[in-house]
Amino acid sequence: MGKSFPGVRALKDVDLHIRKGEVLALLGENGAGKSTLMKILSGVQPRDEGDILIEGENVAIRGVQDALEHGISLIHQELNMATNLSVGANIFLGREPKKRGLIDETTIFTDSKAYLNRVGLDVDPQTVVGDLPIGRQQLVEIAKALSVKARILIMDEPTSSLSQNETNTLFQVIKDLSSRGVSIIYISHRLGEVEELADRVTVLRDGENAGDLLHSKINHDAMVRLMVGRDISQFYARTIHEPGNGVLEVRNLRTPEHPEHELNFSLKAGEIVGMAGLVGAGRTELLGTLFGVTPAVNGEITVCGEATAPQSPEEAIKAGIALVPEDRKQQGLILEMTVRENLGLASLKQESPKGLFLNDSREGEITQKIIQKMSVKTPSDRQVVQYLSGGNQQKVALGKWLAMEPKVLLLDEPTRGIDVGAKQEIYGLMEDLAKRGIAILFVSSEIEEVLGMSDRTLVMHEGRITGELSRDELNEESIMQLATDNPNAA
Amino acid sequence: MKVSYNLCLISALAAFTFGLASCGGGSSGGHKATYAFVSNGVDPFWTIAESGVKAAAADLGVHADVLMPAAGAVEQKSMLEDLLTRGTTGIAVSPIDSANQTDFLNMVAENTILITQDSDAPDSNRLVYIGMDNYDAGRACGALVKEALPEGGSVMILVGRMEQDNARRRRQGVIDEVLGRSHDPTRFDAPGSPVVGEDFTILGTLTDQFDRAKAKANAEDTLARNPDISAMVGLFAYNPPLILEALEQAGKLNEVKVIAFDEADRTLQGIIDGTIHGTVVQNPYMYGYKSIEVLKAIHEGRDHGAGDDGFINIDARQIRKDNVEEFWADLKKKLGKE
Amino acid sequence: MISFLSKLTGPQNDGMKRILGIFVLLMMVYVVTAIINPNFLGSYNQENLIRRTSLFGILGVGVAFVIITRGIDLSLGSVVCLVGVGVPWLIIDQGWPVPVVILIALGLPAVIGFCHGLLITKLKLQPFIVTLCGLLMYRGITRGFTGDQTAGFGTELKGLRWFATGEIPLRIGLDIPVPAVILMIIAILAGIFLNRTIYGRYMLALGNNEEAAKFSGINTDRMIILAYVISSGLAGLAGLLFVLDVNLAQPVDFGNFYELYAIAAAVLGGCSLRGGTGTILGVIIGTALLQVLRNMMNMAFLGFQRAEFAVIGAVILSGVIADELAKRAVARKRAAQKQK
């Protein structure tokens, strides 16, 4: 089976081939053209030039329906499911089997069950999708793709919101599918996964083929080299240095989501502490409580010796706590507003002469400083944020706190869904901020990132802090043991 | 589940229909007779009628309710339906939209004694119509226009709405009298285009759907459009006061003649001050009083005093500077204000 | 001039373009009407138009704040009724002293808005429901305490009525109605508030994305409550001016549908019901367009007066459609540029 299409405008003469039953990883920084390529293949966007050949036959894909008919199915990064409908209803959405004009629920039930079995998912097809954890929703999407007899399955960042366990399950399913002859195009920023999974790697850079790597040649450095076009000797910017005085002290804290557990930990000035755990371990909720989004049930939070009990982000910020939330589009940024307005939003009051009027020139100054410092790539500070790439958006979401000099910076999945180059810049920034004496606590589901960036690591499991690992004790196994709370695990 | 729900609905409907039939039809037996007087809106005009209703109820020893729908024909309809459900003996109504309410009014007439007042529903099975002939009243108003403008001139007519039979006939009466035409209530001139006669031109008719600000804007726009207009006629009670407001702000009081209808305080004051030439008043007090009297007579099987056409005429009067003070004093007495 | 305007409208995206678009539409209606009836341009008619635009404009500016914070206020017409009927009723029928009544007329609506805001932010009720209930309640209360009687000033209070009916003579052959001065003051204050103060920025931000605004440390509840206070407060002021102008108010229908005129004007003027965008100048031009359209029906198309609402509806709809198409064209252009 082959596929090629030279000459799409956002893409310049890109070739892509995939064999039956092959797992092909497609890599590239954001803006390299991966998404465009996938949109063309799945019929979301028309192509300008070039051909798509399936089993030697030139096929015309004019819409999503055409793509499905040719067995091409795309599983989008942000899952596209009606979360208020049942699993079965989602699998057959738009193609509901009918009996006497009514939806045939029996067929939906039995057929769904069969497809769910193939992806190793043991749930009742009548379960409402929104009630499933995100990893299982992903598997439902795959079951849906199987139900349309997909021969080529395109998966865009499928693991970005999955825990390690869920990721493992997904990999099993992928391997199983490929052994049954389904071809899989796998797009990911997580190079570790690619190493584990891919038969072959195709790298795109600036809309062109940057190179292919065969199974034996797939390794981290080789992939990064192809993606950024240069060597990256020191990917993580972390340097070891002595932490300063205690900044954040958390004593007997109970969060509204897990009031049965008391949480205790502290952060020192200039320290970067990672927080690992599976999705749903209560890490995001803990950050939410520290930041006043979901105020604590009880317990003490002390910032630089002053007790605080933030009831709202406003109060948390006053106490010197800042948060870059995981969902940057919904919580971190106001997409419809400009870079300048976003960067200024958190510090408006402090920069306003009488606490009332906007200070235009000061705002401009601060904005320029942050843009330069963080090398935000934007045509101007009047650019609307939604037109920036993911990495640059994240820089803005982080940058808005720089103007107000927080004492504690909380980062929730700071590099989720952004490309390698931007990741590295974010790491560099974390390092800079730590050097300036800010205490940083970051939640990450990428073990590699936790290993690379933290001075110290806290691990959570089901709302509890199950352990703390120093840099010496830190490795993948020790994290997974604590994250699954299983001292006997490998 | 669904079946039982439907059953519930059906039985509820059945109970309702049965209740309606038994209340409406069997009203002559047993409990005390009650009458209802339903207006076509909320207005001081109806407050005067209300005092007539109350006076009649007291004189005749019956119970009578006065209902004023605030939200147009839809509310009037549900008011009438509720009255039927309650088992009212007789209803006197001023239909808001007589042409389209005929079937509904006939349904009401089947279940209770129905008469109309103020505005008629000539095609329905109402037994009696108490009111004035609006066409004649309109002609009386037209006569005031000719009186105010012996040399002739241009005239704009302002009215709340034209869907009502009374408004339509009233307006036509004004036009026919001003232009010196023959007596023909069925004539109809389109409201938008000017009607030109020998001495007079009727510039048009503006409606406001009871929006007071709009009514004033209509008067203002008339002055803007026709700076040299000779007279404005306000056919609903609130129209003349708003015409005065517009004239006052434009500095054209006394320059443009105003001929009014009904007896708003500001209108009567305007006649005393000389800013309004005159007005034609109905006798809403008598509408109220007579309605209850006639309903009781029909209920008791006595003669109601109307002719074959079922029309009981309550004359309209022309009020000018010479008789305004006497009229106003009498009005205040009826309203119990003094 | 342009820089002054942009100071008032702020650096919002496409704000100026929207204003320009609706202004062109307004001018077209002007030209058409003036050709059909030259009296349309007479100073008397223009003064009337300015006065009406000013009265309705005050309502529009108020509701714009609520719409910008992604809310809606359906109770405006009933607040107009409450104040419009209540003021003459208290002064003439009940004999209360004028200053006290004026104080109530301006203060009570603000309290009403505060309650709306509290219910919407603290109890998390939907703005549509809260203000719909307000729509029903305030008119009902007014009808209750007045016994459905028309209230008016008769020939009294000429001095106070100057605020609505008075005119300030200019030497250009056009006198400026006093309400226009009032609107001008309100508009400038509102424009400065929305675009030059941090609270205005907060409102725009939370209208776009309330959660992100909260995550930036903004007390969003306080801002939303403030928006409803402004909206109801200005409705109260408008109600006062309306009754001073018209001189009589009927509880049943005074101010009926005015909330819809205000919302329509705000939307025409560039406020999105999705929140986060809107300019004061746009709202005022939107109001002017509506009033000129109504005037046009009387001045130029007398035979079609009945179709007035149809014309207004069609103009609003075509305005919104044109705006959406323009936005798409811009988006396409942007996408095309990106591809290159």
Image: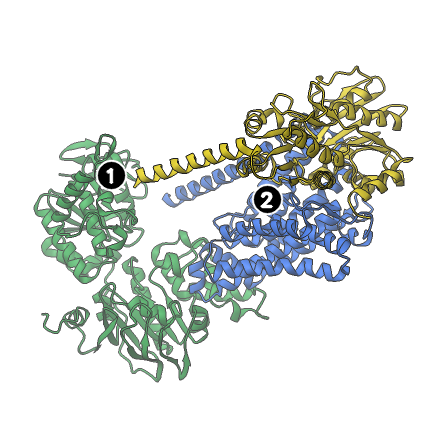
- Residue C22: x, y in percent? 59, 41
The quadrant the N terminus of chain B occupies is top left
Q: Is mark 2 on a helix, strand or loop?
A: helix
**Residue A462 x %, y %:** 23, 68
Task: Name the amino acid, label 1.
Answer: Pro
Relative side of C185 to A201, left or right: right
Instruction: Between residue B262 and residue A388, name the one nearer to us.
Output: B262
**Residue A275, percent from left and from top:** 26, 71
Residues flagged by tags 2 and 1 on a common chain: no
Residue at point 58%, 25% (across, down): B102
Q: In this view, does A476 lie above or below C165?
A: below
In the current view of this chain or complex, which residue is farthest to the left? A179
Mark 2 is surrounded, within 10 Å at the Cα level, by few (under 14), some (14 to 19) or many (20 or more) other residues, namely many
Q: Can residue C3 be seen in this view?
A: yes
Q: Position of residue B107 (x, y in %)?
A: 54, 27
Q: In this view, does A376 lie to the left or right of C51?
A: left
Q: Which chain carries label 2?
A: C
Tell me the yellow chain: B
- Horizontal relation, residue C178 to residue A335: left or right: right
Q: Colour of chain A?
A: green
Q: Up-down: is A239 above or below B159? A: below
Residue at image mark 1: A6
Residue A364 placement, left or right of A219: right
Name the one closer to the observer, B120 or C190. B120
Is residue B171 shown to the viewer in this render?
no
Residue denoted by label 2? C265
Farthest residue toward the right? B322
Numbered tag placed on residue A233 in the rendering: none
* Chain C: drawing colour: blue
- Distance, label 2 to label 1, CA atoms, is 52 Å
